[in-house]
């Protein structure tokens, strides 16, 4: 597959025609090579020759996370000897899924991230400090590393955690950009304030934010985004991706949603009945990869709830854009007559200055319905914290979940269980997942 870096700036009609041709090529490849999709096509009587437009995708079956967990290696389209890298999902939503990449897939991944960093105003003269792991089969860390190399910029691989070391490295090596989880960026800011580091006079000019939202559904900064920029005057760029899609949606400087890369992926927004929704309507993100050799995916249901924007962007790109994730379908909580997603609860807690850390737990109560338990860390006396937080929760959620208070060490153990690659802020302990 030949990449087309200029496609994002071409007409929407040119993008559409490119995707139709790339889809037809990918469908032929899948039908010829994928054990899993051969079985699916046969079971559904699928005739790929009838797929003439992107709207025709709706006639094809979707693929779920559980399909990949149950039939993982049946998705492989190349001989084992062609695989150059084995990566895996984090396993936060069940058994980890292995994603195998060929040399071409690795080049595609590097190209994807080069385009993403360029979209986020990345330049060859930048120095990026990577505050994330590159081990444990973590595709994202490897992708950022390769993308920065492709961009021609410099990088410093400090890994996650250890604010004193991060700050020492920033000042010694003059990194002007960081790649990190937003909640850790906030910890860096808090450490700086505690140790008399002037956040208005650091080398850092921008941050690529991964793994957590920094904006709400209205594209305005959420509590986490406001906390960071309120203390640390720099530019934040949000990015959305998953191991399975091998592609990122990244914000430009306008901050109006993550830009689609039309030469790498097709995305749809589906309602609960599986029907394609229009721009501005919220539904589940479903993706079809383009140009993937090892494990291409057809109409893969991510479980993430978003909407698409098609209004013009000031950066000059003509692509659609994806909103922040407002929740995950599997994580939807039905609590005392209210439907909630964890990010909404996170945003409420992030707005409360005396809550330093938290974990949101949902479980099945004795009536068989969802119940919420908030695990909190606060410097306040527990009685004072309860007196302050309960009215806030009542006003925002209309209900008051059960509260549990923990030491700093205890809450960190909850957030970083053994073997975890990511910070855990949501525990789903329901008897039956949604």
Image: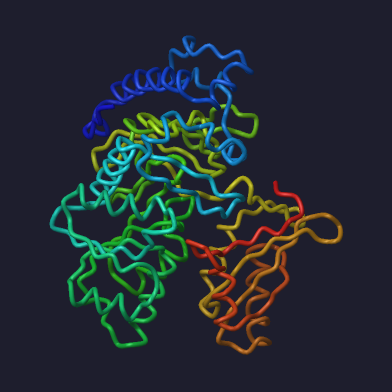
Question: Horizontal and vertical percent for residue 121?
Answer: 22, 51
Residue 133 location (% of width, % of height) = 38, 62
Classify residue 112 as left or right of residue 154: right
Q: Nearer the viewer, residue 131 or 395?
A: 131
254, 209: nearer the viewer: 209
Q: Position of residue 390 (x, y in %)?
A: 68, 75
360 vs 161, left or right, is right
Direction from residue 73 to residue 8 in the image, left or right? left
Residue 68, above or below 171? above
Instruction: Give the color scheme: rainbow, by chain, secondary structure or one colour.
Output: rainbow
Q: Pick whichever, 356 or 99, lies toward us.
A: 99
In this rendering, the answer to whether 370 lies above or below 201 is above
The residue at 62%/38% (across/down) is: 70
Q: Residue furthest right?
A: 367
Which quadrant holds residue 289? Answer: top left
The spot of residue 34 in percent (x, y) is: 49, 25
Q: Quadrant of residue 312?
A: top left
Q: Residue at x 49, y 40 (%)?
A: 307
| Residue farthest to the bottom, as pictured | 381
Image quarter for residue 85?
Answer: top left
Quadrant holding the N terminus: top left
């Amino acid at each position: 597959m030949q990449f087309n870096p200029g496609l994002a700036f071409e007409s929407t009609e040119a993008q559409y025609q490119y995707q139709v041709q790339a889809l037809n090529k990918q469908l032929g490849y899948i039908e010829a090579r994928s054990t899993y999709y051969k079985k699916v096509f046969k079971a559904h009587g699928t005739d790929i020759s009838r797929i003439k437009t992107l709207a025709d995708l709706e006639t094809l079956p979707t693929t779920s996370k559980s399909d990949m967990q149950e039939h993982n290696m049946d998705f492989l389209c190349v001989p084992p000897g062609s695989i150059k890298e084995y990566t895996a999902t984090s396993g936060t939503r069940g058994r980890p899924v292995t994603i195998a990449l060929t040399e071409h897939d690795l080049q595609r991944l590097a190209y994807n991230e080069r385009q993403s960093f360029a979209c986020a105003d990345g330049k060859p003269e930048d120095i990026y400090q990577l505050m994330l792991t590159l081990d444990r089969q973590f595709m994202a860390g490897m992708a950022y590393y390769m993308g920065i190399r492709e961009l021609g910029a410099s990088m410093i691989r400090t890994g996650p955690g250890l604010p004193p070391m991060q700050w020492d490295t920033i000042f010694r090596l003059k990194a002007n950009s960081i790649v990190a989880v937003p909640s850790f960026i906030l910890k860096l800011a808090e450490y700086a304030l505690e140790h008399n580091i002037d956040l208005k006079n650091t080398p850092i000019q921008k941050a690529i934010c991964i793994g957590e939202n920094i904006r709400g559904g209205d594209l305005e900064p959420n509590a986490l985004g406001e906390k960071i920029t309120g203390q640390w005057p720099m530019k934040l760029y949000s990015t959305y991706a998953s191991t399975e899609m091998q592609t990122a949606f990244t914000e430009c400087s306008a901050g109006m949603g993550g830009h689609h890369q039309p030469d790498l992926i097709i995305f749809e927004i589906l309602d609960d009945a599986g029907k394609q929704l229009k721009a501005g309507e919220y539904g589940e993100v479903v993706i079809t990869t383009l140009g993937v050799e090892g494990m291409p995916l057809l109409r893969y249901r991510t479980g993430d709830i978003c909407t698409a924007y098609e209004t013009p962007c000031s950066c000059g790109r003509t692509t659609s854009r994806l909103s922040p994730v407002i929740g995950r379908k599997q994580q939807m909580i039905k609590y005392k007559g209210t439907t909630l997603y964890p990010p909404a609860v996170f945003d409420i807690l992030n707005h409360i200055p005396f809550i330093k850390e938290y974990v949101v737990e949902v479980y099945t109560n004795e009536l068989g319905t969802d119940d919420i338990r908030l695990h909190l860390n606060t410097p306040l006396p527990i009685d004072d914290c309860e007196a302050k937080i309960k009215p806030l929760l009542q006003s925002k959620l209309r209900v008051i979940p059960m509260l549990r208070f923990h030491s700093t060490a205890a809450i960190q153990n909850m957030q970083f269980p053994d073997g975890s690659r990511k910070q855990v802020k949501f525990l789903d302990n329901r008897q039956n997942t949604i």
